[in-house]
């Protein structure tokens, strides 16, 4: 895992001092080696840099930027191609010679042989930049899920392009004032949305979207075109039986674990005690009965949110070296500045802090690679199983009599109250647009703390998020599968992966996510929906069955979903006594009414009943703007 960075400029010198400063800010992503290549292509000068975290082929031969033998191609790459051995064999058979044992050389040779089509052959996580000096093209490529990040900025004159693995580094590379993207502030505060598209919280800085590539051409000006290289194919495989599907899921997941264990350094797992992380850890033991496994979990002081007993159960059953982490409100206050800076942009909740501290603990043991269960819920039909989508499916099929049967089974299976069932029924029956209007919290409007009209008044210039953007994922049928695809494609998974990348790389750790390979996701999303979530509402039904005999049965029988949950209310409340320190910049933000916002925050933290996550979002946005020196477009 690494950090990549680059700068291209036409008829102007690249500020090397600025570039080195920006590249050095990526030290945490790659502390093992620093590489640099510079040159001129026609009228364009360029510098491409790399920070290496050595995982495969620890020798100097794997250092980057990596050049082709004919010096035509230059590669700066962040990620892992897990099936590089198989691709290396294929390329060797057609005449390629290899000088290293790393996936970097395989990636570059695959690109030289297959071109853009090579991306579809890669099973892994990646963000890379390939410069083709002959064609004067630069390609920025991101993996199908967006596990690894890459940001870029192009000046209005299209004479200067910069890119980097992290937004903080890119800000340094730009070297001029940066401004708040009002649209993103609006979406974040009003909807809790972020990381679902190319735009970032900083105006004119963009993220390459997951599953996309951008081709920049350097002639007199910089022209570019975007392409979505991964368009998932998941037509329903109605002929496959449940038993056949169960066996195939088991085989594919074990194959994924084997690939994700390829490393020349020691590996551990983040073990929450949920089904996904327990399956990863248990499969490692199943495949390697004698291997030492280091596991790490988080223990919440709130017993209702504490999964440590489940993690300890798994650890004891399969014999791992398990470490448990606890955190306090005082520690959170000490670390909040560091956390807000390293995340680069605002984020959704304080649970990200628990994850950060967990990686910090892992670093103490000099573990450089961790396997994590991120993405399991999105590809398997986890969380609550999206029962409202199943109800919509039954309505579409006009199976109205099956709805009360489903609700009855759901109540038993997930131990739900009648009130919760009625809420789910309403979500399944009512139109999505109406639900969106109903869901707006009354708390957010009672105090008149923000002027959304002022923030949204420039709607002709800025295309603010509309609920209609969600509707493109739905066609009246297959609502469950389309919901899962939506969470993979834009709304949900992308933010979780951002948190994990920044938290792990801040501690120079590579975090691998075995659930997220494109072929595995496509296979799961092609299954009949009731294989993912059963007719009785059991989540991850096919996966639970496939893991029998590998994962402890008590884990497979769990009905709750917690994860690394922090005492959100307590942690946010710990900041309120010094609230001016975090939100004083709001005095200068036209769309936030400072005194009313303070009153609003005090109300939200007066009791757990009043608490709303928007409380954290207000604090986070303001404090991030203050720490990042973000200017306002007024």
Image (spheres, rainbow, N blue to C red):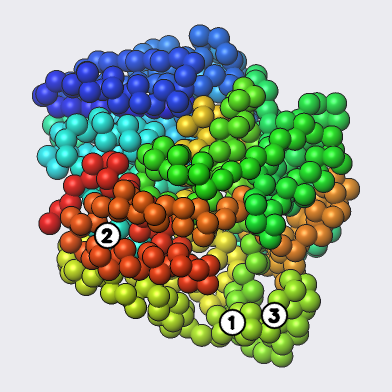
Q: Which of the 4 image quadrants contains residue 567?
A: bottom right
User: Cβ–Cβ below 8 Å for labels 3 and 2?
Assistant: no
Q: Is residue 446 above or below residue 58?
A: below
Residue at (26, 52) in percent of width and height: 584
Q: Earlier in the sequence, mark 2 or mark 1?
A: 2
Q: Is residue 196 left or right of residue 405?
A: left
Q: Position of residue 20 (x, y in %)?
A: 28, 19
Q: Position of residue 587 (x, y in %)?
A: 20, 57
The residue that label 3 is drawn on is 417
Marks 2 and 1, how far apart at CA: 31 Å
Marks 3 and 2, how far apart at CA: 38 Å
Q: Position of residue 441 (x, y in %)?
A: 42, 75
Marks 3 and 1, how far apart at CA: 10 Å
Taking depth in this image into account, of 569 and 172 the one nearest to the observer is 569
Mark 2 crowd level (few <14, some 14–19, many ≥20, 10 Å Cα): many
Circle 1 SS class: helix
Residue at (47, 32) in percent of width and height: 506
């Amino acid at each position: 895992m690494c950090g990549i960075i680059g700068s291209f400029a036409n008829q102007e010198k690249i500020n090397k001092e600025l570039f080195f400063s920006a590249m050095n800010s990526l030290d945490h992503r790659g502390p093992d080696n620093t590489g640099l290549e510079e040159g001129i292509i026609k009228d364009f000068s360029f510098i491409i840099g790399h920070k290496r975290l050595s995982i495969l082929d620890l020798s100097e031969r794997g250092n980057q930027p990596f050049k082709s033998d004919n010096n035509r191609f230059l590669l700066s790459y962040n990620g892992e191609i897990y099936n590089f051995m198989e691709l290396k064999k294929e390329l060797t058979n057609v005449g390629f010679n290899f000088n290293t044992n790393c996936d970097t050389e395989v990636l570059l040779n695959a690109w030289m042989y297959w071109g853009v089509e090579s991306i579809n052959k890669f099973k892994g996580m990646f963000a890379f930049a390939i410069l083709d000096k002959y064609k004067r093209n630069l390609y920025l490529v991101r993996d199908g899920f967006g596990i690894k990040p890459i940001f870029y900025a192009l000046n209005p004159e299209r004479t200067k392009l910069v890119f980097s693995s992290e937004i903080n580094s890119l800000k340094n590379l730009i070297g001029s004032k940066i401004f708040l993207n009002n649209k993103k502030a609006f979406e974040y505060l009003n909807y809790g949305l972020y990381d679902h598209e190319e735009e970032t919280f900083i105006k004119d800085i963009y993220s390459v979207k997951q599953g996309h590539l951008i081709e920049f051409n350097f002639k007199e000006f910089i022209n570019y075109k975007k392409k979505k290289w991964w368009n998932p194919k998941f037509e329903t495989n109605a002929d496959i039986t449940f038993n056949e599907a169960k066996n195939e899921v088991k085989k594919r997941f074990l194959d994924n674990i084997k690939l994700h264990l390829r490393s020349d350094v020691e590996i551990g797992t983040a073990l929450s005690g949920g089904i996904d992380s327990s399956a990863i850890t248990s499969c490692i033991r199943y495949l390697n009965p004698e291997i030492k496994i280091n596991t790490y979990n988080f223990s919440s002081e709130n017993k209702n949110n504490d999964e440590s007993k489940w993690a300890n159960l798994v650890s004891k059953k399969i014999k791992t070296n398990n470490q448990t982490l606890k955190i306090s409100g005082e520690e959170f206050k000490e670390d909040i500045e560091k956390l807000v800076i390293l995340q680069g942009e605002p984020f959704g909740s304080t649970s990200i802090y628990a994850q950060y501290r967990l990686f910090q603990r892992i670093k103490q043991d000099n573990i450089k690679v961790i396997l994590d269960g991120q993405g399991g819920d999105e590809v398997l039909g986890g969380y609550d199983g999206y029962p409202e989508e199943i109800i919509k499916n039954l309505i579409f099929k006009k199976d109205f009599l099956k709805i009360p049967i489903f609700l009855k089974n759901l109540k038993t299976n997930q131990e739900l109250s009648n009130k919760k069932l009625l809420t789910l029924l309403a979500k399944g029956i009512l139109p999505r647009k109406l639900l969106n209007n109903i869901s707006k919290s009354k708390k957010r409007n009672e105090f008149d703390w923000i002027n959304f009209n002022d923030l949204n008044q420039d709607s002709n210039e800025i295309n603010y998020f509309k609920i209609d953007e969600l509707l493109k994922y739905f066609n009246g049928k297959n609502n469950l599968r389309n919901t899962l695809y939506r969470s993979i494609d834009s709304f949900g998974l992308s933010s979780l992966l951002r948190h994990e990348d920044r938290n792990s790389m801040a501690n120079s750790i590579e975090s691998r996510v075995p659930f997220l390979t494109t072929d595995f996701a496509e296979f799961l999303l092609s299954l009949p929906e009731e294989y993912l979530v059963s007719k009785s509402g059991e989540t991850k039904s096919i996966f639970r069955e496939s893991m029998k005999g590998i994962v402890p049965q008590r884990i497979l029988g769990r009905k709750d979903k917690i994860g690394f949950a922090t005492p959100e209310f307590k942690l946010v409340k710990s900041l309120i006594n010094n609230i001016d320190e975090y939100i004083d910049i709001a005095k200068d933000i036209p769309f936030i009414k400072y005194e009313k916002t303070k009153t609003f925050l005090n109300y939200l933290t007066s009791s757990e009943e009043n608490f709303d996550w928007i409380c954290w979002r207000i604090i986070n946005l303001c404090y991030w703007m203050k720490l990042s020196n973000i200017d306002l477009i007024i």
